[in-house]
Image (cartoon, rainbow, N blue to C red):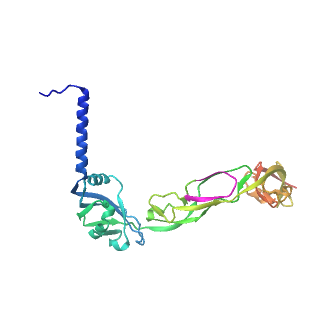
Amino acid sequence: MISWKNDGRDWVTFALCLLLAFSIWLIHNLSLNYSDFLTVKMTVRCDNIEGHSVNSANSCEVVARCRTSGYNIIKSSMALRRSPVQISLDRQSLTHKSGESYYITRKELNEAAHLLYGEKVNVEYFLSDTLYFRFPYETHKRVPVFPVKSMSFAPQYMSQGDLEVEPDSVTVYGEPYHLENVDRVFTETVKLQNLNASAAGVTRLEKIKGVRLSESEVHYSIDVMRYVAITRDVTIGTANVPSDKEMMIYPSKAEVVFKCVFPLVSDVDYAEFHIDYNDYIESRSGKCIPVPGFLPEGVLEYEMFPEIFECVVTEK
């Protein structure tokens, strides 16, 4: 007579043996070949349908009787939850029905069977006879590229001009209502920190929903140069004041920080700034911003403190 000990360890061993036996049975059965109907979602890409989008706007389900392993059958059933398989076809493989509608037949499906189901699946026959795809009408236009940047410079360094991109414009393709509000394309942010030399590189363009771009990235470049900062007190003059008028400027002097090329090529003491009487007439408040009458060679830019001056005009 066989007795079974009521020992917890024996129950655990028995459960593990059952689990191992089930695993071996499952692996063996999944490795066997079976015939079953497998379903795959697909979309179509065609690069040379003139006046139409290159990608179909819809997807279709492809159903075929296939012979393959149990693993692949389970894998195929899970694939329906993922993104459709995109198949690239040439224009000759698509038959035009009307308008935006094109279709493919079993002939094209047979040629793409390995792409749809994989090399390890033997397709016996397709239930799908004809699949229809819509390639929307699209137009195009040329729009400028707007560089988005985040830059900082090392002390005594500055940019010589703006960040430039090449190409500076791209062609956008899409359905008319998608293109209505597209008047420019932005780059991803170009981050350049603590610059002390010219820089160049490549940055991608931001994608726009429903729109296709002729370029996916652009080259950027920026010229960086060293400068020397010189501070001077400058008297603010006047210009074009009528002979019977007198114009007073308050304050009469400004502190100007000149950023000049390095090494220095000229003396900033000869710089001149004035306020034009015509600017005063056009102003509503009597406050104006001085403009340079003369800037010595080598001055890249300047900052003036204060920036705005009050003008008072009196009769002589």
Q: Residue 162, how many percent across, how many down?
A: 66, 59
Q: Which residue sits furthest bottom?
A: 92
Residue 59 shows in the view = no
Q: Quadrant of the N terminus?
A: top left
161 left or right, relative to 57: right
Say if the magenta span includes residue 275: no
Q: Quadrant of the C terminus?
A: bottom right
Residue 139 shows in the view = yes
Of residues 50 and 126, the one drawn nearer to the viewer in this rendering: 126
The magenta-colored residue range is: 190-203
Of residues 253 and 140, the one drawn nearer to the viewer in this rendering: 140
Q: Which residue sits furthest front?
A: 1
Say if the magenta span includes residue 193: yes
**Residue 220 location, quadrant:** bottom right
306 left or right, relative to 91: right
At 32% from the left and 54% from the top, the residue drawn is 79
